[in-house]
Image (cartoon, rainbow, N blue to C red):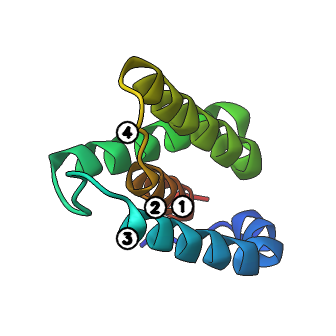
Amino acid sequence: MRRLRPSYLAFMRPFARPFTQLCCLSVLLGACSTGKDPWLGQDKALHFVASALIAQHLNTQLDDPQQAAMMTLAIGAAKEGWDDYRNPGSASWRDMSWNLAGTVAALGASPE
């Protein structure tokens, strides 16, 4: 059975409230977004899985969950910026919410 790493839990404790607020903000912004951008679907699953894989890889390379999380979310934000550049108005808060969820899931499941 895998357990959460104590260093990860210590890292997350000061960010618990801002993380919860960020999740709520992402949900609210996603709920207010217009167009065809459902919460569930293949695109969202790809965002979750890609972010989880990137976060896990970076964490094994850097051995620092905080840096791995920040770099993973920066990659996700850059991808959304690229989407918006190619097709203005296509950046999605819902995609970023799934990026965040994948990042947290991967780092939370990291073995000791």
Q: Position of residue 102 (x, y in %)?
A: 43, 55
Q: Is residue 86 above or below residue 93?
A: above
Q: Is residue 82 left or right of residue 60?
A: left
* Label 1 with label 3: CB-CB less than 8 Å: no
Q: Residues within 10 Å of mark 1 (few under 14, many from 20)?
A: many
Q: Position of residue 27 (x, y in %)?
A: 45, 71
Using the image as rendered, state which of residue 37 and residue 21 is in the foreground.
37
Q: Position of residue 3 (x, y in %)?
A: 54, 72
Q: Which residue is mark 3?
A: 31
Q: Which residue is mark 4?
A: 50
Q: Which residue is mark 2?
A: 101
Using the image as rendered, state which of residue 23 and residue 45 is in the foreground.
23
Q: Which residue is mark 1?
A: 104
Earlier residue among tags 4 and 3:
3
Quadrant in which the N terminus appears: bottom left
How far is mark 2 from mark 1, CA to CA? 5 Å
Q: Amino acid at mark 3?
A: Ala
Look at discs 4 and 3 and give the one toward the viewer: 3
Q: Residues within 10 Å of mark 3 (few under 14, many from 20)?
A: some
Q: Amino acid at mark 4?
A: Ala
Q: Residues within 10 Å of mark 2 (few under 14, many from 20)?
A: some
Earlier residue among tags 4 and 2:
4
